[in-house]
Amino acid sequence: MQSDRPVIQDNDRISSSDSTAPAAAEVLIPECERLLTKLRGLRVSHSDEVDEQKILACETQLKKVIEQFYHPDLIISQRVALALCVLDILEEQPELYSSDTSQVALFKKNVTGFLQTVCNVNEILPGMRAQLKKLLQIDPYYLPNHLPPFLAPPCEGQSRKEYLHKRIQDFLVARQNGLVLTLVEGQLWSEAISKEALTFFRSGKQESWSTRKLSDVEQSLFDTYEYLHNELNEESTRELDEVQYLDVRARDALRIFIANGRLNRVVFHPDNRSQPFEIQAASTQELISHDKKGMACFVMNCRGEMYISSHVENKFHHSSFMSGGDLIFSGEIRINGNGQVEEITAYSGHYQPDIKAMYRCYAMLKHRGLDLSHCIFSLLDNKAMAREFQKRCMLDRGFEAKVKANDPSVGPILTSITNKSMKRLTESDLLAAMKVSSKVQRSQMS
């Protein structure tokens, strides 16, 4: 006989299509808030078995949020949204995590410490948490104290469509005004577009595009990719395959954060239930860049996010971090074992930053509270490099021809020449040099 007891269902909107991965922030955050509000009301007014089933359904969904927090493959932005939801749950329904209050307190402290580090703040106040939850529903990648001055943060009440339209406008204006770095023209730019062409054809997109009418933009892309794809030979294809272009998850593993005046890394330990986050001092002591041990490849992307890694010739370049995308700064960095910055250089053949790019990077780091009092800033001295190059050409008559022919044997020599041609500046030197550069630019324009 069929029971006449009502069947209570609560739509599972917490998870994405992957049952172990969380939904997007714009779904996860309001759904978590809805469940907490519903559970709060049911516990106040419940009087029958139907209410008990509703309570159990809400508790099951909220426990799922906590479990998703330990998913090993989440990126930082996903974990931030989950952390905000988890803190709400721990404050209202701590027993859903553990009946041991000391474990709840330890977990809450660890999650709060994670948010403080990635948001670069000393304290996560309730008002800030509430605002951040609203803004993440507009921009799921948003973090306080990261964006450059030319990009406006999301605003409460703004639709995602409105925000994206404004963000694109802001970025294009910044690009037009030379506030971001793009891959240099010629061979290096071709690296990025050629890798896109390989991806386009290998993914089979050309088959689907060839069966429908293309827009003018699509047709232009198709023609470019087809031309580059036909021009690539076996050797150049192999070389392109060897150069890494990172996706968002691979990139996240190389990310560093400013906290308490130092640079830090966030390491996640999913098996540690009460203390899954470990905040470590970032260091380049085990890395290498352009034959310099203890130095690392360093970039700041157009959202103000920072990444470091070893530079590996023909395998990992400055272009690797953002897959050939635009940057605010590209160079090298030396960080000691305590997370303190000792040197930043403008050595990047792919993006070739000038003193203005170096200054923009410096200003953003300073504004975000990074201690640069012991940092040396190294800029390429083109005159010194020309002298070193001429010396080499006099010692080796065939050297210039090898350089023009892209002979790989000259790579280490050019690296050595560049390293010798760097001009080292203190913080005050950099500020003075930037003032001189600005005066020269104004006089040229007048």
Image (cartoon, helix red, strand yellow):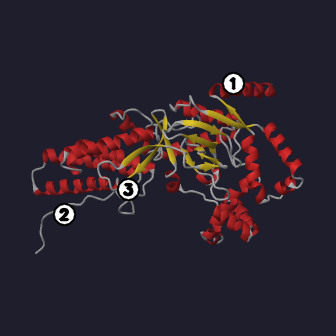
Find disc 1 in the rendering and name its residue.
432
Q: Is residue 341 left or right of residue 128?
A: right
The amino acid pointed to by label 3 is Pro
Q: How crowded is the residue under tag 3: few (<14 C-alpha within 10 Å), some, or many (20+)?
A: many
Q: Are marks 2 and 1 in contact (CB under 8 Å)?
A: no
Q: Are marks 3 and 2 in contact (CB under 8 Å)?
A: no
- Residue 348: x and y in percent read 68, 46
**Relative to the observer, which residue lies in front, 31 or 236?**
236
Q: Identify the image quadrant of the C terminus.
A: top right
Q: Residues within 10 Å of mark 1 (few under 14, many from 20)?
A: few
User: Mark 2 — residue?
Assistant: 7
Q: Which residue is mark 3?
A: 22
Real-space Cα distance between discs 1 and 3?
49 Å
Query: In terms of secondary structure, where does tag 1 sit?
Result: helix
Identify the residue at horizontal 31%, vertical 47% (top origin): 86
Amino acid of disc 2: Val
Residue 384 shows in this picture: yes
Crowd band around label 2 with a 10 angstrom C-alpha radius: few (<14), some (14–19), many (20+): few
